[in-house]
């Protein structure tokens, strides 16, 4: 094939890729653009178009590389700067994104939409710089320790769900006089229905019972707000329960019980209700594990996460929650959760409520171990073997005990074990590779096999990636991705899925389609919504 023929064929394939993109077949479009680039690597638009596909599939690191290559080929190619700005913003690189948008506006000074985008990013940049400037002056006490519920009485005309009150702290008082369950946490502190009753400071008398959760479910479905008093109470109670626990939690599936493992739900409250309809209502025998990413993107994130938190308090030993990469400050500022809180609770109360959510996210466990055999984590595995496990055999690795002891009460950094557990993805080939997201790694079947063998496990269950069929089985059946947000962002057309796991570790996959929701689009509250 001559060079002229190659260029002509590349254009033909690019046009096919454009059609695939318009049909929202982004992965197929990426493959087609890649073929075009192999035939003719001199066309900036090929890279720019593939970058847009990477943005739509959340592979922002790869998008930045492609956009940068387009600029390298032709530094007058404005669309390359635009694509790179969008990807940088998605990764929280606000200053760098602002610089690229300045270039775009300089070249397109009469484009109102582009100028509006620069204005939005500039405002985000100013807020970021202000936050950094005052960071050393802020009160370093936990927000949960300074909130007094007496300052937030219920309104006289409030007609929504009501939390019952237990008796004021006595040694034998219970959270729920009918169903009180007393046990000892891993630190020996008394726990009653998810409440650490040793915490006498700012004692909270409210507790969650089934009547409250049932009423809350309907209240949220009708798009009504929970009062601040109850928002604060639930978040503080959950913090007090979770904080003493280890970062890896053991889960036992009891006889005649089932464990439903769900992936990302991303603020899709009405799809969450559908999961409970399909899988059955949570109970002590119909147990659940939600594998992170409760918030962001979907515009009912408050409703989603608060219902999950309420269920955790109702069934602390039968309803489990993992932290995802979107249970973090940077993601919440860009992808909608902060904006939703400010829109629904105002700019006076909203910031403190948002800070309290961040504190609560920081104490969520990072992983769960089911029946001593199934390792459940939001993202995946690690970039390096951390230490010698067996000096005589020269074996290195990451053990479950190391994960149990992770210091999780912080924001994820750019690297490290915590970040990798939240962000990593599997790949088909052996070994490790940089993650196309721009954070953490991609890990192959051999890395999975080594981790499982070292820790005497049978499989990894993770989430973090949208799958067309709701789930995907990789690494010879030893690494499964479960994603539970159907028609992700109201546009991807994918199914959702969840796993049903029996006490004997028999597994059944259930898939489901999206259900209608009120006319509030995904990303409605997101700072970056004009770009994605």
Image (cartoon, rainbow, N blue to C red):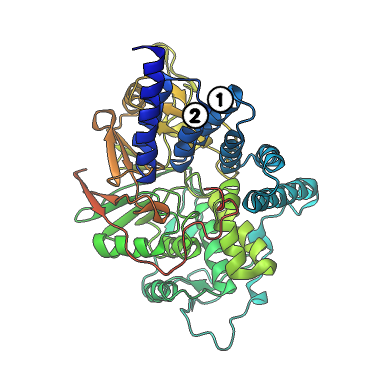
- Report the disc number at residue 130: none
| Percent position of residue 228, x then y | 59, 72
Identify which residue, 444 or 17, lies in the foreground. Answer: 17
| Vertical arrangement, residue 193 with respect to residue 30, above or below | below
Mark 1: few/some/many CA within 10 Å (<14, 14-19, 20+)? some
Residue in the picture at 47% in, 64% down:
306
Residue in the picture at 60% in, 46% down:
330
Q: Quadrant of residue 266?
A: bottom left
The answer to whether residue 55 is left or right of residue 466 is: right
- Report the disc number at residue 47: 2
| Percent position of residue 154, x then y | 58, 81
Identify which residue, 101 or 206, lies in the foreground. Answer: 101
Secondary structure under the numbered disc 2 in the rendered image: helix
Dot 1 or dot 2: first in sequence order is 2
Identity of the residue furthest to the bottom in this view? 157
| Percent position of residue 102, x then y | 71, 41
Q: Are marks 1 and 2 in contact (CB under 8 Å)?
A: yes
| Location of mark 1 (residue) | 69
Residue in the picture at 38% in, 18% down:
6
Q: Quadrant of residue 80?
A: top right
Identify which residue, 294 or 174, lies in the foreground. Answer: 294
């Amino acid at each position: 094939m001559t060079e002229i023929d190659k260029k002509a064929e590349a254009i033909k394939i690019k046009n096919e890729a454009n059609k695939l993109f318009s049909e929202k077949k982004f992965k197929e479009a990426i493959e087609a653009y890649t073929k075009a680039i192999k035939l003719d690597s001199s066309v900036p638009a090929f890279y720019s178009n593939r970058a847009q596909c990477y943005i739509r599939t959340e592979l922002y690191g790869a998008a930045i590389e492609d956009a940068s290559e387009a600029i390298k080929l032709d530094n007058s190619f404005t669309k390359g700067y635009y694509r790179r700005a969008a990807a940088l913003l998605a990764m929280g690189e606000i200053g760098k994104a602002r610089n690229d948008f300045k270039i775009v506006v300089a070249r397109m000074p009469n484009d109102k939409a582009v100028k509006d985008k620069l204005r939005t990013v500039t405002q985000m940049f100013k807020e970021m710089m202000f936050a950094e400037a005052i960071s050393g002056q802020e009160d370093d006490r936990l927000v949960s320790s300074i909130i007094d519920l007496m300052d937030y009485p219920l309104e006289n005309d409030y007609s929504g769900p009501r939390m019952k009150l237990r008796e004021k702290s006595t040694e034998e008082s219970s959270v729920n006089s009918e169903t009180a369950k007393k046990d000892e946490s891993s630190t020996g502190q008394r726990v009653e229905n998810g409440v650490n009753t040793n915490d006498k400071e700012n004692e909270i008398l409210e507790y969650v019972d089934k009547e409250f959760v049932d009423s809350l479910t309907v209240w949220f479905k009708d798009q009504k707000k929970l009062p601040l008093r109850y928002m604060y109470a639930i978040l503080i109670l959950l913090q007090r329960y979770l904080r003493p626990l280890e970062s890896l939690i053991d889960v036992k599936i009891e006889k005649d019980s089932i464990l439903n493992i769900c992936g990302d739900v991303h603020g899709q409250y009405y799809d969450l209700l559908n999961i409970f309809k399909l899988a059955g209502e949570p109970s002590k025998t119909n147990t659940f594990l939600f594998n992170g990413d409760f918030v962001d993107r979907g515009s009912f994130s408050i409703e989603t996460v608060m219902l999950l938190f309420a269920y955790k308090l109702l069934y602390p030993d039968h309803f489990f929650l993992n932290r995802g990469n979107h249970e973090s400050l940077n993601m919440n500022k860009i992808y909608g959760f902060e904006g939703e809180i400010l829109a629904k609770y105002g700019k006076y109360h909203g910031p403190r409520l948002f800070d309290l959510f961040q504190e609560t996210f920081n104490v969520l466990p990072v992983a769960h171990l089911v029946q001593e055999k199934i390792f459940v984590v939001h993202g995946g595995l690690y970039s390096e073997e951390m230490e010698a496990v067996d000096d005589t055999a020269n074996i290195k690795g990451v053990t479950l005990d190391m994960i149990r002891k992770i210091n999780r009460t912080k924001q994820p950094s750019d690297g490290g074990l915590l970040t990798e557990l939240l962000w990593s993805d599997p790949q088909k080939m052996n070994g490790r590779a940089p993650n196309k997201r721009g954070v953490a790694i991609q890990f192959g079947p051999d890395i999975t096999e080594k981790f499982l063998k070292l820790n005497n496990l049978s499989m990894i269950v993770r989430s973090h990636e949208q799958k067309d069929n709701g789930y995907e089985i990789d690494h010879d059946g030893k690494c499964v991705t479960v994603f539970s947000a159907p028609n992700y962002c109201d546009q991807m057309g994918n199914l959702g899925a969840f796993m049903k796991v029996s006490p004997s570790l028999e597994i059944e996959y259930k898939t489901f389609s999206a259900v209608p929701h009120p006319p509030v689009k995904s990303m409605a509250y997101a700072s970056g919504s004009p770009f994605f």
